[in-house]
């Protein structure tokens, strides 16, 4: 993977597939999808795949909420409930929010820093394929029991998969094996993309794009990628330990032999808290792009927003015990981590204040992307505040493992991350489809989702404080929980309706949406200087950057009061480049050739994982596939022109 | 040759080669990987409820020799890189092969040690010592194995004349990885074998 050398001779295999490659080279035909290396295409594939998983996770959520609509409902039994709950959480974290963020990393980072692609296009394709393989593998667990008679084979240990719930004794069957190996595979995908985006951002910036001229989204991608490459190995070790315990009778979490189940919790949360910032920082980046554009003002306090992002990145390593207050680590540990947890609220608050200051006094344009961004700020703030309430140890003793915590993390993950990701869709999809999404449908989507979201999750604060434990498959009446659960379930279906409207909007706009043009929002950053959809090579000429918000400064100067005035008539809405759109057509720009080896290499992982569970012979097969992929990859030239 | 698209022969923003930066980041990530494994070993040290215990099994002189072998392989790795940077393909081939051989020697030492321990009653499931010891040193051994494969691949490709002075980065990257794996062993050897409470 790491090494490549120039090729002087072709192998037979490569020869045979040369035609296919050439076809893909011209960016049409099925091969351009099987062997993609273009960051935009990979971004779209990430987005579409993750959205499909979003629908799956959403259906799981609806099943859970239907079961909880009234006391003692008979929709799901305990076992089914546990398994669907586990898959819902795991799916939303690892198969939806992370890959949707990855979709935006892919689509946007190269455009925003003025690059033609990422640093390692084939590694990028590899990330996608591994992610897809891991997602399918994880979900395949459903079918390891007789699903048609209602027996689900999925894992039943919760998305945190605490030991000893995850041990062979308490979870026989293969569900947890699939979970551990599936998350492990997904980790490989994240690691590969983490490396790739750090190198891309550090090394591939256009001339003049200094670090402190980079758009906030790029900064947050960078911080997130660093969190990924340092957090993923920690969970990888924890998962290996779990796998060794389950498959080879090791004793890491086996109390009989002196093992300590708490080790899992420490490792999980040492990974887990950075992980929640892996989930939210990209969302913060998206919002930090949208608010300035639709307020027609630069981001307020850019350096503060950047540095608080970096500070969050560092501090996220020092708070994990707030998930473990009730495990008996002692007053000193609890107090120390209580303080660090309260402190991490500070940079978070700095960001919120800067977003509000960005909007303050701006000329706001409340288009759909902006609505979702503002919704993000409001909902995320509520989630942040409930987070601070359970940073307080005695208070958390009451809240731990109740619906109050469920309310907290849905306000930050759904009200936060998902709202921001939708903001990103409305804002950036037109760049890649060339068609604007319908704004009226977008507004309906927004309001329905906002109402549905609050209807679902606000009542959970109350049911939680009334003592309703999380992760229960049913409850009896007379505890004051009924009405709140009813509301939550109604809310969940409201959210589902809003998602349907979004899908209709996408399909509708693809067919007959208004053309987006280069710059539909009067944007500030480099992606709006190129056509929608962008050509394969992004920038015909690599731009030279002179300021933060480079495109804005190309279009506007300021009067004495700091109000923007257009530089040249027409330049503000029209486009300096539009006139000579046709020239050149990008001939002579060397782009990387498509490659199917990343796909082959990626296939090795699920095969090996299946082999570990069922038949060791398959492990050898998987390893062989992986080797073929890696060697083919290392030995093929990166671009067609380079072999001579 | 760098995958840096369209900028294959341009400077990077930092001046650092893309692939080299990638390797450094990868090794940074690996630190956390081995750090977690070592932490688990240390946490469970002396917590085994039944034997055999480390003091019953460790053969320090033997393991010192194999640690020395691995250390020497780092020297030959340095020589391989120095050779190709001067354009001495022959020299590089010799030293690459030497490095791989030393790596294999280390691995056979580990295989011998594992079987030996196994004979004396230690398996993955015997006790916490068995669990943490085999997993930690096993993952290190897996890393050495991958390193040997990389070295042998480089060696083979170079026999076809495909590694010249201008391609020395390939050797350098393999070297970075190799030295890292070596350093990890020094840490493991010290913490697991030498410092025993
Ligand atoms: C203002 C910053 C935040 C603070 C002070 C905070 C604090 C906490 C605390 C103390 C808990 C443990 C509650 C318990 O189990 O009793 C918790 C749980 C959780 N938080 Fe936050 N949080 C913050 C922001 C976030 C963000 C931004 C996210 C994700 C995007 C997040 C995701 C979660 C999740 C997923 C859990 C529950 C994990 C589980 O047990 O399944 N939090 N938070
Ligand atoms: Cu946390």
Image (cartoon, coloured by chain):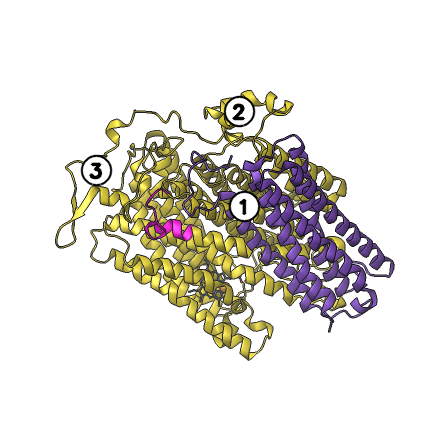
What is the CA distance from the residue labelled 1 to the residue labelled 2? Answer: 30 Å
Mark number, residue B78: none
Which residue is disc 1 drawn over?
Answer: A192
Q: Earlier in the sequence, mark 3 or mark 2?
A: 3
Q: Nearer the viewer, mark 3 or mark 2?
A: 2
Q: Earlier in the sequence, mark 1 or mark 3?
A: 1
Image quadrant holding the C terminus of chain B, namely: bottom right
Shown in purple, the chain is: B
Mark number, residue A573: 3
Q: Is mark 1 within 8 Å of ligand 1?
A: no
Q: Nearer the viewer, mark 1 or mark 2?
A: 2
- Callout 2 crowding tier (Cα within 10 Å): few <14, some 14–19, many ≥20: few
Q: Chain of mark 2?
A: A
Asked if the residue under mark 2 is in contact with the one under mark 3, i.e. CB atoms within 8 Å, the reply is no
Dot 1 lies on which element? Answer: helix
Which residue is disc 2 drawn over?
Answer: A644
Asked if the residue under mark 3 is in contact with the one under mark 1, i.e. CB atoms within 8 Å, the reply is no
């Amino acid at each position: 993977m790491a090494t490549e050398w120039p090729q002087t001779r072709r192998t037979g295999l490569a020869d045979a597939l040369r035609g296919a490659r050439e076809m893909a080279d011209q960016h049409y035909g099925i091969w351009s999808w099987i062997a993609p290396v273009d960051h935009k295409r990979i971004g779209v594939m990430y987005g579409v795949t993750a959205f499909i998983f979003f629908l799956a996770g959403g259906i799981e959520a609806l099943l859970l909420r239907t079961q909880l609509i009234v006391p003692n409902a008979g929709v799901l039994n305990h076992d089914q409930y546990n398994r669907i709950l586990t898959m819902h959480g795991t799916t939303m974290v690892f198969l939806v929010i992370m890959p949707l963020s990855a979709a935006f990393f892919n689509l946007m980072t190269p455009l925003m820093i003025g690059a033609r692609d990422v640093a390692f296009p084939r590694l990028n394709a590899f990330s996608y394929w591994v992610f897809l393989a891991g997602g399918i593998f994880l979900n395949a667990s459903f079918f390891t029991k007789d699903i048609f008679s209602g027996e689900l084979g999925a894992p039943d240990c919760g998305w945190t998969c605490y030991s000893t719930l995850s041990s062979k004794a308490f979870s026989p069957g293969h569900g947890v094996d699939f979970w551990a190996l599936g998350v492990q595979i997904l980790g490989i995908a994240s690691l590969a993309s983490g490396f790739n985006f750090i190198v891309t951002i550090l090394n591939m910036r256009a001339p003049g794009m200094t670090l402190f001229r980079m758009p906030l989204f790029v900064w947050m991608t960078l911080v997130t990628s660093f969190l990924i490459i340092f957090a993923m190995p920690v969970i990888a070790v924890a998962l290996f330990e779990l796998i060794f315990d389950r498959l080879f009778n090791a004793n890491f979490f086996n109390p009989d032999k002196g093992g300590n189940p708490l080790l899992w919790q420490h490792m999980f949360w040492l990974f887990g808290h950075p992980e929640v910032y892996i989930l939210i920082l990209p969302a913060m980046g998206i919002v930090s792009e949208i608010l300035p554009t639709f307020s027609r003002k630069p981001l307020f306090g850019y350096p503060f927003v950047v540095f608080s992002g970096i500070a969050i990145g560092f501090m996220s390593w020092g708070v994990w015990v707030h998930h473990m207050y009730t495990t008996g680590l002692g007053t000193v540990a609890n107090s120390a981590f209580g303080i660090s947890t309260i402190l991490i609220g500070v940079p978070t608050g700095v960001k919120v204040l800067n977003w509000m200051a960005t909007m303050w006094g701006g000329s706001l344009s409340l288009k759909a992307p902006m609505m979702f961004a503002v919704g993000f700020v409001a909902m995320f703030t509520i989630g942040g505040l409930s987070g601070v309430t359970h940073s307080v140890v005695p208070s958390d003793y009451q809240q731990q493992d109740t619906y109050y915590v469920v309310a907290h993390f849905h306000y930050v993950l759904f009200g936060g991350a998902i709202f921001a990701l939708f903001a990103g869709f409305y804002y950036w999809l037109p760049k890649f489809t060339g068609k604007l999404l319908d704004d009226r449908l977008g507004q309906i989507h927004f309001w329905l989702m906002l109402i549905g979201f609050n209807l679902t999750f606000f009542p959970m604060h109350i049911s939680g404080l009334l003592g309703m434990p999380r992760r229960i498959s049913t409850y009896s009446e007379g505890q004051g929980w009924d009405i709140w659960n009813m509301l939550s379930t109604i809310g969940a279906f409201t959210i589902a309706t809003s998602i349907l409207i979004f899908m209709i909007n996408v399909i509708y706009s693809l067919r007959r949406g208004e053309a987006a043009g280069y710059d539909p929002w009067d944007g500030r950053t480099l992606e709006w200087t190129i056509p929608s959809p962008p050509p394969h090579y992004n920038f015909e000429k690599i731009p030279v950057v002179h300021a933060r918000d480079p495109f804005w400064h190309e279009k506007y100067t300021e009067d004495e009061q700091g109000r923007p005035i257009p530089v040249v008539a027409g330049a503000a809405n029209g486009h300096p480049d539009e006139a000579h759109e046709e020239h050149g057509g990008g001939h002579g720009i060397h782009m990387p050739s498509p490659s199917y080896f990343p796909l082959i290499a990626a296939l090795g992982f699920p095969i090996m994982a299946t082999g570990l569970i069922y038949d060791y012979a398959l492990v050898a097969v998987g390893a062989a596939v992986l080797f073929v992929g890696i060697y083919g990859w290392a030995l093929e030239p990166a671009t067609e022109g380079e072999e001579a | 040759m760098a995958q840096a698209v369209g900028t294959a022969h341009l400077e990077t923003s930092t001046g650092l080669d893309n692939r080299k930066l990638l390797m450094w980041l990868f090794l940074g990530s690996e630190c956390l990987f081995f750090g977690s494994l070592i932490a688990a070993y240390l946490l469970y040290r002396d917590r085994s409820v039944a034997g055999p215990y480390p003091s019953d099994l460790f053969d320090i002189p033997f393991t010192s020799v194999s640690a020395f072998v691995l250390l020497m392989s780092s020297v030959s790795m340095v020589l391989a890189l120095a050779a190709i940077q001067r354009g001495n393909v022959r020299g590089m081939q010799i030293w690459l092969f030497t490095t791989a051989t030393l790596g294999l020697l280390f691995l056979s030492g580990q295989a011998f040690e594992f079987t030996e321990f196994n004979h004396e009653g230690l398996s993955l499931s015997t006790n916490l010592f068995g669990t943490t010891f085999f997993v930690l040193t096993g993952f290190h051994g897996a890393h050495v194995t991958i390193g040997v494969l990389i070295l042998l691949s480089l060696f083979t490709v170079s026999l076809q004349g495909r590694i010249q002075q201008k391609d020395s980065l390939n050797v350098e990257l393999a070297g970075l990885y190799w030295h890292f794996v070596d350093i990890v062993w020094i840490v493991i050897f010290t913490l697991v074998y030498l410092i025993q409470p």
